[in-house]
Amino acid sequence: MSALLTLAGCQKAAAPAEPQTEDVGAARFVVAVHQAVTASDVQRVDLTVDGPGQPELTVQLAPDNSVWTGLLSQLPAGTGRRFRAFAYDANARLIYRGEALDVTITANQTVQVNILLQQVDPSPEFENAGPIITSLVVSRSSVEVGGFVDVRATAYDPNSGDVLTYAWTATAGTFGTPAALASRWTAPMTEGVRTLTLTVADQLGASTAVSFPILVEGTGVGEAEVFVRFNSWPQVVSLTGFPTQVVPGQSIGVSAQGQDNDDVAANLHYAWTASCAGTWTDEGTANARFTPSELPTQSTCDNCQLTVRVTDGRGGEGLGHLGVCVGAPVSANVAPRITSAFQTARTVDPGSTVRFNVRAMDPEGTALVFAWEAPAGTLGTPAPISEGSEVTWTAPACVDAQATPVVRARVTDAEGLEAVQTFSLTWTGPACATALGFLMQPSDVLATNVITPAVRVVLLDSLGRTSLAPSGPVRLALGANPGAGTLSGTVEAAPSAGIATFADLSIDASGVGYTLVASVAGIPSLASQAFTIQPLAVRGASVDRFLTTGNAQLSRNTDLGATVVQALVEQGNGTFTTFDGAGAADGTFSIQGVPSGAYYLRLGRDYVVTNSRAPDMGRDGQGRPDAVPASSNTYLAVDLQGLAPWQVGDDIEIFSAGTGLWAQGVPEYALTGAALSAGSQRWTQTLEYADMRNASPVEAAAGDTVTFHQLSLKSEATSGAPVAYTAATRAFSAPLAVAQGGTASFTGTLAALAQDQVLNVDLRTQAFEALRTQVHPGATPVDHVLFVAAFPDGTRGSYTSAPDLLTYFPAKGAADRAFSFSYGNPFPGFTQAGLAETSFTVSLLAPGATQALTVRPSVGQADALPSFHASALAPRLGPARSPTLAGQDAFGNVTGVGLTPRLAWTAPSVGTATHYRVRVYEVFVNAQGRTAQAAGGPVAQLYTAATSLRFPPGVLAAGKQYYAILEAASSGNADFQGHPFRSSWPEAHAMLVTGIFAP
């Protein structure tokens, strides 16, 4: 700042009022404040004058707006006068002063004196350091059109307290947050190199910037290597400079703006200097350039001070400093660039294998680390390839419904920056199961009964849909168990189409609030809703199945309304606890309160030892279930021609699938007409229809047909002396209608049957006879039979009487021998099965009798062809052995066995029995002293799969005598407990006859 003092000397008046004693002059003073100096800055101005002949005189000027004025008169004329001026602020602090020397005061003359008041204290030097960019990280050096690049920088200002601002700019594209250190730049939709710039400035105007290029490419391109150099550090303190961070040889442009506080139009002078080595250009102007020539000794930034000196040519000056950084260039660390990516397939399903590889490079040239990851599926061992890595991935069995299988390659440089290549895959396989659901909840049911409908558990994916993915088995267990029950049945099931079905579950103890818990490995378990198990019960049915015309299947409910229905549970002391049940006309029955485990189920005279809670007591048969037996006055008149010439030993059989009608030796049913004689080829007789088996009237309107076929005597001598057998040779089939109480007519001509059916069999008759003593110690072989018959249904075993195609009756004692029999087949749609059986006789003499009862047990087997004769035809099953009754040898006559004795035995030595049947017959001594069997068949039939049973109460009666036939049996029926009276081939049986016993 400066102030100008102007002094004006005044001339003496021409006619003074008073005579003067000496020469004097007068002076008026005016001090003006210019430019930045205001009246408020200067509060007082003092003026002092002295010199030779002039005593020191001080006056105080008075302010007048922007000037200070005063009048000093009577100044003695003379030379060497000194005028001094002093300006003070409000605190009486001297802020300006100045003087004028050697001023001459001339008498009666005007003199003008100018004094320039200078600042007492010089202006403070302006200090500032420009901001510094310390790092810049760019996520990608190239980007597809419309893609994005993440940028992140760090910066600081050497002057603490300075506030920095940031500005991202680009030649194209947009920044998400242009005023933040971290931002995302979205590339334009056109290709080319775009320049991105970050400018960092402080509040005083100092700034620095760094620019770098980004390559914008079309979609699907890789990344490019970019090297970015960062310019110097701009610093501005009353001046600006750019860049303010440079390397030796790189120039810095600086610009200073000076200002004179007294005269805004003053012509200022500039001079630039630097604290580090270098050269200047235009260093005498406000805008200059400085080029450092070498690195300063100080390695940290702000190591070179640029100073500008501004002078006004009148003794005043001002200084400004700008700190810059001269050092090595800062390079950006750019993430690695993936140069290529490859996969062998994009669409995958379970078990698919896909090979992936990536190649990459690092712009800085550091070593790269490749890592592979896959949230689902299995990665093989990665293998290095040129500039990259390769791996094989195996698809999983399933993926989450809300996920897409991906494989990622991570490429990392030495400083931890990474590039990621994600390979997307299209999944065509099933979604993984993540949860379980009960598609069918368990329902209330009686104890031991099967829970119906079947419990169904569904596997669900994460979207709640049925998962078709393969999984481990679903397992059910009891959760809440209020009755301490046991869960029975198939408790583990493999899902089918995502659903596991449990069709035979049961619980043996009653209770309210049971739950089932479903579980699968790897999936959270799930409890069912609560359900109730009602008190124990056995619920079963006796429904017979029938096959009729056209293989139609029908059923018939056994009316159990008047049948004794009981469950008898054997106790440890040899007694039974009896639970009475009830049967219904529809064939169903129920018995309440039966405990779990084995019990004797009684339906009338049949007792089955079982543990089934829902036994099926039905049987299989042939014919219509509602057929009514023919009355005794129903007849059939036949007139059949075309017979093969009749021989003694020939036979004729009749069969109708519609009713199951069957008879052999049909001519023996003749009521009228001449018997067949040798050579006859026509047969005319009236037959007693009602005496045939299953003789309900056949109905042509229902599609019934009747077949008569002739079995002719033939001879076989393949491996020995000729033997006679009969084979089907002629047959005739036609519809027939038989009316109750009437005589139906059946006429026709038998047609010859091709003898193209062959049975090659190695018959071991002696092996059958060798079982004699196991049948009974006193048993005697009687005869052997070998049949081939035709069955309408081949899945039910020997369920019905079937027409014979071949019969052979080896004599007792016949040697083992191989045969080749030929025969015809009038039933081409039927299943052929063979039957071999040996019969024995056993004589039983009751105490007190003189004559024995003859019993005919047998050992035999049946099977479908060709299994029947696939190997030597020897017994497949032998009789039970070593029978005891109440602990006594059951082959002998025993007494005192009690009313509920135990019959026990050893399993057969030949074959394996699936079950046993015990038929108990009552005997007595008749008036002739003969041992006789009581009429009405067995008093009881007992069935078991075990090797012993106890006679239940009511089977034996005191004072009576009995014998039993113990029959070992085997069948293809795998569920004797649930279906004791159903069968399938192969079948075998072997009977044992006890002695006579009495309670």
Image: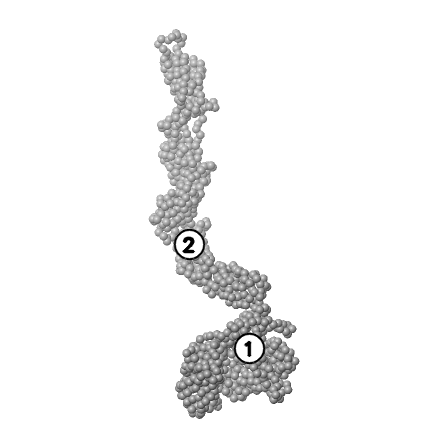
**Circle 2: residue type:** Gln
Residue 853 versus residue 133 in the image, above or below: below
Asked whether the residues under the numbered discs 2 and 1 touch, taking CB atoms below 8 Å apart as contact, a structural biologist would say: no
Q: Which residue is mark 1?
A: 913
Q: x, y (%) of residue 544?
A: 50, 75
Q: In this image, 308 relative to 598: left or right?
A: left
- Say how many tags the image has: 2
Percent across and percent down for residue 23 are 39, 10
Q: Which mark is residue 511?
A: none
> Is residue 193 depicted above or below 732 in this figure?
above
Label 2: few (<14), some (14–19) or many (≥20) C-alpha neighbours in 10 Å: some
Q: Residue at x 41, y 25 (%)?
A: 37
What mark, if any, has residue 421 been given in the picture? 2
Disc 2 or 1, which lies upstream in sequence?
A: 2
Residue 430 placement: quadrant:
bottom left
Residue type, label 1? Ala
The residues bearing labels 2 and 1 have C-alpha atoms spaced at a distance of: 70 Å
For residue 531, what is the image quadrant?
Answer: bottom right
